[in-house]
Image (cartoon, rainbow, N blue to C red):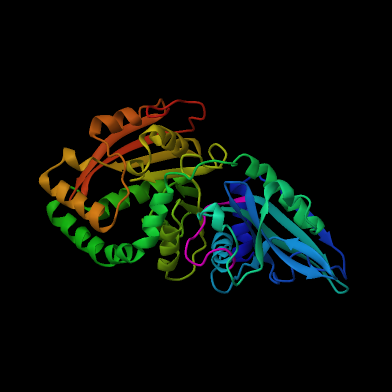
Amino acid sequence: MSVLSQQYAALRMMYSTLPVIEHRRPSGDQPCFSSRHREEHFALLLPYAPSGSILLEHSLQECEELWTLVTGSVDDVSADDFLSTAMRLAKIHVDPVNHPGDVEPFAFIEETVESVDATTKRFGVAFLARVRIPSSTFEGSSEAALSSVALTEASRMTMTELDTQILREAIVRLAEKADRPAPSYDRESELATRYRWRFIMHHSFFKPVLRIASKIFGETSLDEVQKEIASHALREANESFLDVACGENGLCLELAAMDKLTLIVSNDVAWPHIDLLRTRRVGPPSSSILLFTNHDATALPFEDETFGASLCKNALHHVDPTRAGRLVREAVRVARRALVVEVMDPECESSWGRVRHLYYLRFLKDAGIKFYSRSEFSDLTDIPSRRALYERRTVKGVYMFALFDGATNSMQSPGDE
């Protein structure tokens, strides 16, 4: 089985409730997606604005205007995956500068293509993508033949049978998102885009310096903390692991290099962080399937206990305090074992902690909203499935750990509205 076939099978497992649209194309029929996807695997992109508009590609065929979804092949040779292909399509066809948000699968497509000599199958993933530009400028890029269409008018457009089926599924999903305000985490994504080079400098220079310093000055070195977290993943995961808000943390790359887990998933709302991790993956191929996702971690689309283990590290201070409890509960719900790690409020530490905090705020533009003291973290994670609460002191700060058993599907956690 090819790498992309393994990825597709993993996505089917992760998003087990999504519809699978099957289509058979007899010999001689025109391809459904403008002949652009030639490979076995492809991605479809449906950009939308919360105001109720979508972007469709249009062309003339036999003097009739035909509307289609944006589509592209997933390239196995260049280590592409389905999400990065969707992002590439957005950059080409929608906006070359501002990447979309909430790029989420909403359907799988399995197309059987018949020919005189053989019958082949193609596998695709259809993504919704929230465009983060004003509604007044909601059009495709100048180089693409995309036009804005009101969602209420889309069903009247002339489309292929398969595109019509896909659009029908999309309309159901978009009805749930209509007129929602832009989420607060858009600021996080914008800052990650604007200051991407600073994160690269931080990873290349400041992080190694901190790691060396932590072996001299801290009670626990940063390497020991990372090993402890990795050990949790390997010990508890039982094949699959999810980092619910990875940021630029390279734990997923370390786990993939160990080649001991079947599936490793790193999720983040900010695509620049995901893209940075993708470019850092080096070394020989691993049998572990490494996937990236772009979901709001307080509303993950996965079923209960989809993963063996999950991690939520240094994400709570990025979330509105009214949703922090929901983030904890989601991290616990989607896995059989969960670990929540959060750096203590620097104001509760020494003067060095406050100086270090200024570096993150001023240079890295850390979009922290609310930092937690020891007692606040204990209250926030105080749900019945918590089995351990402890901390590790490092040169980078005091890391507070909360370890959980099982799912808490219906439990309320402190910090929720």
Position of 309 with respect to 60 (left or right) is left
Residue at the spot 47% in from the left edge and 33% down from the top edge: 406
Q: Quadrant of residue 40?
A: bottom right
Above or below for 166 versus 193: above
Residue at the spot 47% in from the left edge and 48% down from the top edge: 241
- The x and y percentages for residue 363 are 25, 58
Residue at the spot 53% in from the left edge and 64% down from the top edge: 95
Position of 30 with respect to 321 (left or right) is right
**Segment colored magenta:** 93-105
Q: Tell me if I can see residue 223 in this picture.
A: yes
**In this view of the protein, which residue sits in the foreground, 206 or 58?**
58
Q: In which quarter of the image is residue 283?
A: bottom left
Q: Tell me if I can see residue 258 in this picture.
A: no
**In this view of the protein, which residue sits in the foreground, 146 or 119?**
146
Q: In which quarter of the image is the N terminus?
A: bottom right
**In this view of the protein, which residue sits in the foreground, 407 or 203?**
203
Residue 237 belongs to the span the image colors magenta: no
Residue at the spot 27% in from the left edge and 62% down from the top edge: 202
- The x and y percentages for residue 70 are 66, 63
Residue closest to the far front: 136
- The x and y percentages for residue 54 are 64, 53
Above or below for 302 versus 146: above
Above or below for 383 versus 10: above
